[in-house]
Image (cartoon, coloured by chain):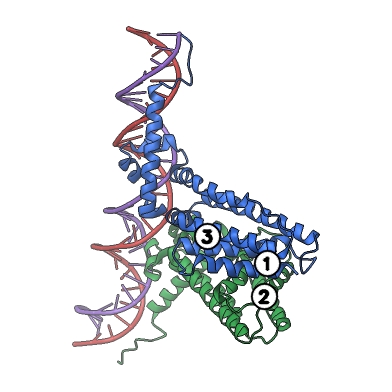
Chain colours: A green, B blue, C red, D purple
Amino acid sequence: MIKLTHNLEDKRKVRGEHSRTKILESAKKLFIEFGFKETTIAMVSKKASIGYGTAYTHFPGGKEEIFLTIIKEVLEEFYQIANGEFTVNSKEESLAVTQRNIENFLKLAIKYQLALKVLHEAIGLSHIINENWQNFIKKFIERISDNVKQAMEKGLTRHKDFDPEVVAGVLFYTGEKYMWKVALKQTDKDYRVIASSLAQMYVNGLYR
Amino acid sequence: MIKLTHNLEDKRKVRGEHSRTKILESAKKLFIEFGFKETTIAMVSKKASIGYGTAYTHFPGGKEEIFLTIIKEVLEEFYQIANGEFTVNSKEESLAVTQRNIENFLKLAIKYQLALKVLHEAIGLSHIINENWQNFIKKFIERISDNVKQAMEKGLTRHKDFDPEVVAGVLFYTGEKYMWKVALKQTDKDYRVIASSLAQMYVNGLYR
DNA sequence: AAAGATATTGACACCATATCAACTTCTTTT
DNA sequence: AAAAGAAGTTGATATGGTGTCAATATCTTT
C-alpha cells in the first residue's frame, strides 16, 4: 500500500494533537489562575492528564513555548491596530485617527485583561517572551515613525529637526504604559480620558 | 562593668560588618559581570570568602535584599532630579527646564549604565525590586503632575480638561523608556537629541 | 570560669526544569 | 499475520538553585 505520510486517520497523530490541545487548554487556565511563575509543567501535565515528559515532546521550549503559543492569538489582534491606516493630511485628521487608535488599543487591554496580566509577568521573567514583545513594539514604532516622517515632509510639523522615533515614542510608550495600567488595574481612569489627553499632547506637540 | 551595647570595640560586630561589606563588594562585581539571575548566593559567598549561610544572616531577603542595598545609592541620585525645582511661569521657561531635566536624567543613565542594566533585569525578575522602582516612578509622576496642574491653573495650557497624570506620563514614561534604551545600549541617538525632541513635544503639547 | 550573646557554617530539605531510556501504540513492510 | 519501524508517552533522574537550621566558634559579660 502507498505510504500516506499525511494520513489524517493516523491514530498516533490524532492522539498527539489531542495531547497538545489538552496541554494548551490546561496551561491557559492555570496561567490565568496562578500566573506565569507559579504555574509549573507538573501542574499542567497533571491537569491535562498526560505524563510529565509529554509536555516537553510537544513543546521543547517548555513553559515559555507553551505560553507563547497561547499568547500569540492575543498579540495578533494588537498587530491589526498597527497595520491599520495611519496616513493623514492635516492636524485635525491626525487628532481623530490618533485618538481612535489609542482607544482601540486600550479597549483590547480591557478585553484581554487577564491574559495581559500574565504576559506582563512573563515579559519580566522570560528572555524569549520579552524578545517577542520587543518585536511587537518595534513594528508599532516603525509604523508611527513613518507617519511622522510623512507629516514632516508635508510641512505639517512644528519643527524639521524632530527625531521621528522619539516623537513616535511619545505616543507609543505612553500608550503602552497606560495599556499595562489598564490591564493590571493600576488606574481607574476611563480609557477615553486617557486617549483624549494623550492624543491632544501628541498631535499638538508634533503639528504646527 | 557597664554593658556597652554599642561598644565599637566589640570584635563580633566588627567581624560582622566586615562580612557584610565583603558580601556587598563581591555581589556588586558579580552582578555587573553575570547579571541578576546568573549571580547566585553560592558565587557571592565564595567570592566573599564566607560561609554560604552567612549571606542569609546579613541579608535575610537573600539576593534581592543584597541587590537593593547596592542599587539604593544609584536611585538616590535619580531622586535628586525629581526633587529639583520644577515650577515655571512661561512656555519658554518650561522648555528650558524640561530639556535640562531630561538631559540630566539621561546623563545618569550613561553614568550608571552597568548598574542600570542589572536593575532592568532585576525589575522583571523580582517583585520587591519592581515595587521599589514603581515607588520611584510614582514620585516623579507626582512631581510632574503637580507642575502640570500649576500650569493649568495659571492658564498657560492649551486645554483645561487635560488629565495631569496622563500629561506627566507623556514626559516621564517616554523619558524612562529612553533611559533604559541608553542604559541597555539599544539606541545610538545622542542624549541631547532625545531630550530636545521630547521636551519640544511635551512643552508644545501642553502649553498654548 | 561559667553563662550568654553574636556570628559563622555547610549540610540538607525543597522545588522546578529538562532529559532520556524504556515502553506502548499504531503503521508499514514483507 | 508477523516483524520491523515510526510516533508518541512516561516518570525516574540529574541538575541547579533557594532558604533553613542545628551545630559550632568566637567574643563579652557576669
Q: Nearer the viewer, mark 1 or mark 2?
A: 1
Residue B106 - label: 3
Q: Amino acid at mark 3?
A: Leu
Tag 1–tag 2 contact (CB < 8 Å): no
Q: Label 1 sits on what residue type?
A: Val
Q: Nearer the viewer, residue A208 or B173?
A: A208
Q: Label 1 to label 2, Cα distance in Å?
A: 26 Å
Q: Are marks 3 and 2 in contact (CB under 8 Å)?
A: no
Q: Chain of mark 1?
A: B
Residue that appears at 66% across and 67% down: B202
Mark 1 lies on residue: B203
Give the quadrant of residue B15.
top left
Q: Residue at x 44, y 22 (%)?
A: B8
Q: Tag 2: residue type?
A: Asn
Q: Chain of mark 2?
A: A
* Residues tagged 3 and 1 counted as in contact (Cβ below 8 A): no
Where is residue B54? Give x, y as percent: 38, 35
Residue D18 screen position, x and y as percent: 42, 45
Q: Quadrant of the N terminus of chain A?
A: bottom left
Relative to A51, say whether A200 is above or below: below
Instruction: Name the side, left or right, on which D14 lies relative to B58.
Output: left
Closer-to-camera residue (B93/A166): B93
Q: Quadrant of the image for the C terminus of chain A?
A: bottom right
Q: Please provide percent x and percent y for residue A17.
A: 44, 75
